[in-house]
Image (cartoon, grey):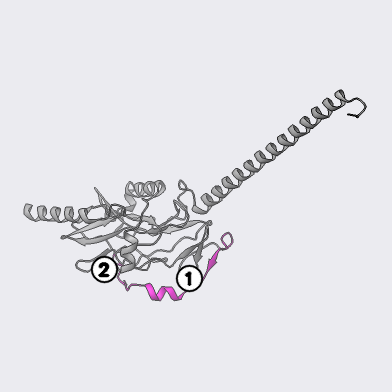
Amino acid sequence: MKLSRFLRILLLTAVIAVVPASSFAAVFISVGIAPPVLPVYVQPPCPQPGLLWTPGYWGYGPAGYYWIPGAWVGAPAVGVLWTPPYWGFLGGAYVFHEGYWGPHVGYYGGINYGFGYMGVGFVGGEWRGGEFAYNRAVMNVNTTVIHNTYVNRTVVNKTTINNYNHVAYSGGPGGINHPPTAQERVAMNESHMQPTAAQTQHVQAAAQSPQQRFSANHGQPATMATARPMTTARPAMAMNRQQNGYRAQQQQNRQQQQNRQQQYRAQRQYRQQQRADQRQNYDHPHGRW
């Protein structure tokens, strides 16, 4: 038993050594029991522009597995997308891989989280300039306040990995069999950003809630998804507006400064001309040389 545990730790250490340092993708929590199946729930409507959906998933703590509700969150920067975390079977144990923000969606084990995360990539929307457009074929959007939307149903069938049993882990006995594609491997090695402070607080709140624990809810958490957006992270579109406003204010300040400099030069030239005229009149009071 001790030898088996030693070999498992040795294998995990070897895997850590080859994980790209820029990925932020691997938080090696080794668990001997498979995560529960993903519960089926309804996505709350996106309440305001600029928020991105982060699907719910099972976390693990001292009290066992607990459900982290899906939620709308502000992206840390314009143009980045969320790669969800996932559980993968490795070395005889179930290993947790942390999610991250990046320019493209990377590998998340082929897990079908729904709402645009069908197992490969993301089809729930796309960045168009400084604004995020939502695909209403798979995303629940409040169209009374959000107008930047479109409908594309063809991408759903092209990217969905069959997961009728709602399995929550990749590899191993009974897990999803989906090795990373070439495109996912490229995305995994891109520069990534860690989860925001709001997301970290969201996970901590779920971990501290007894009702979210699998031992208490038996796979039906009290809160599967939250309609309230994570507010401590500023929505990306709001950040973009703030940046644009700051740049506009800087431009206005520069223009005002240039105007003041031009006025100062004009006034100085006028005073110089006045003094020149006064000297000329003093030297030649009758205007003759």
Q: Residues within 10 Å of mark 2 (few under 14, many from 20)?
A: some
Chief SS of the magenta region: loop
Residue at the image point whose x is 82% and y is 25% from the top:
279
Q: Secondary structure at mark 2?
A: loop
The residue under label 1 is: 137
Name the quarter where the N terminus is drawn: bottom left
In front of the other: label 1 or label 2? 2
Vertical order, 60 against 38 (above or below)? above
**Pointer 1 with pointer 2, Cβ within 8 A:** no
14 over 276 or under it: above or below: below
Determine which of the numbered discs, if any, sits on residue 212 in the image.
none
| Residue 110, quarter of picture | bottom left
Q: Position of residue 8 (x, y in %)?
A: 13, 56
Give the magenta range.
143-167
Quadrant assignment, res 190: bottom left
Residue carrying label 2: 179
Residue that lies at the very extreme toward the right in this rendered image = 286
Percent x, y of residue 14: 17, 55
Q: Mark 2 is on which residue type?
A: Pro
